[in-house]
Image (cartoon, rainbow, N blue to C red):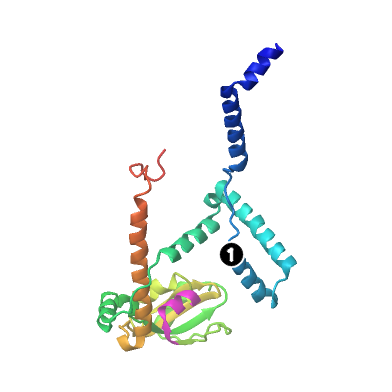
Amino acid sequence: MRQHLLRILRDPLFTFCLLGAGCFLLFDALSDDREAIIVSETVREMLIDDFEVLQGRTPDERDKAALIERFIHEEILFREALSRGLHFGDARLRLMLIEKMRFLLADIPDEPTEEELVDYYVDHLNRYTSEPRYSLRNVYFRHAPEDPAALLSDLRDGADINGDPGFWLGDEMRAYHASVLHNVLGAGALPVIEGMAVGDWAGPIESPRGYHFIRLDAVIPSQPRRFADVRSQVREDWAAARRSDSIHQHVQQLREHYAIRGLSQPLGGP
């Protein structure tokens, strides 16, 4: 038995297998298929810069070690959150990531020519048109009148009726923008005002503060604002549109890497 064992040990094939097994074990020990967290020099510089801005001093060696350890700690938590799909269930976090990607994908447009800005202004003239404005006589009541129909009839007949004091905009509302009246008198007021002729009375209109009988005294219709007055806004809108176009183009290119399924199924389907 002993001689048989010595013969095996002296066999070159045994030696070869032993060396091969050793190499395999060494390779397995040295290889690491875990996800790498790289604390690069760029990361270190960023951590130090942030520390100096927040603390107002240069970090010492102990501070640097703590900064790196905190970075690793937070990076592990961040990657675990992604691996567990937490961003799919958190609408706010999902939106933040989407907006970050929009920022990264958006190309910075070249400076527009004056002709491009004028063309954009003309093509989107509705954006640069002023709101209509209305002047109203307002008879205000804190509580609903007992006989609103009779009160409205009296006002239309020319009766001089005073409501309750205390409405913060007073009895005469001169040249108020439509959006202001919408906010002050409530969502139901503007459609009524838009359907009135100058001199008409309407009411009661319920607002968050009470009840209103109103007479339409004047209308200043909406009109386009001069290009010179809105040029800076047109410039911003033009640039935003170009960035949006570039994002759309990039997303369409990225879309080729995804298999989109379920488009034929209607919303709310099984």
Of 78 and 145, nearer the camera is 78
> On the rendered structure, is 189 left or right of 63?
left
> On the rendered structure, is 11 left or right of 171?
right
Query: Residue 99 at what x, y percent from top left?
Result: 47, 63
Q: From the image, which quarter does the N terminus lie in?
A: top right
Q: What residue lies at 41% left-to-right and 74% top-to-bottom?
A: 190
> In this view, which residue lies farthest toward the right?
62
Query: Residue 147 at what x, y percent from top left?
Result: 50, 72
Numbered disc 1: secondary structure: helix
Q: Would you say residue 61 is visible in this rendering?
A: yes
Q: Would you say residue 195 is visible in this rendering?
A: no
Residue beneath disc 1: 41
Relative vertical location of residue 149 with respect to residue 253 in this rendering, above or below: below
Give yes or no for residue 256 being in the magenta stretch: no
Q: What residue lies at 44% left-to-right and 64% top-to-bottom?
A: 104
Give yes or no for residue 178 being in the magenta stretch: yes
Give, as a three-letter code, the residue at label 1: Glu
Q: How crowded is mark 1: few (under 14 residues within 10 Å), some or many (20 or more)?
A: few
What predominant SS class does the magenta segment belong to? helix
Q: What residue lies at 58% left-to-right and 84% top-to-bottom?
A: 166
Query: Residue 58 at what x, y percent from top left?
Result: 69, 75
For the magenta stretch, what is the residue range?
174-184
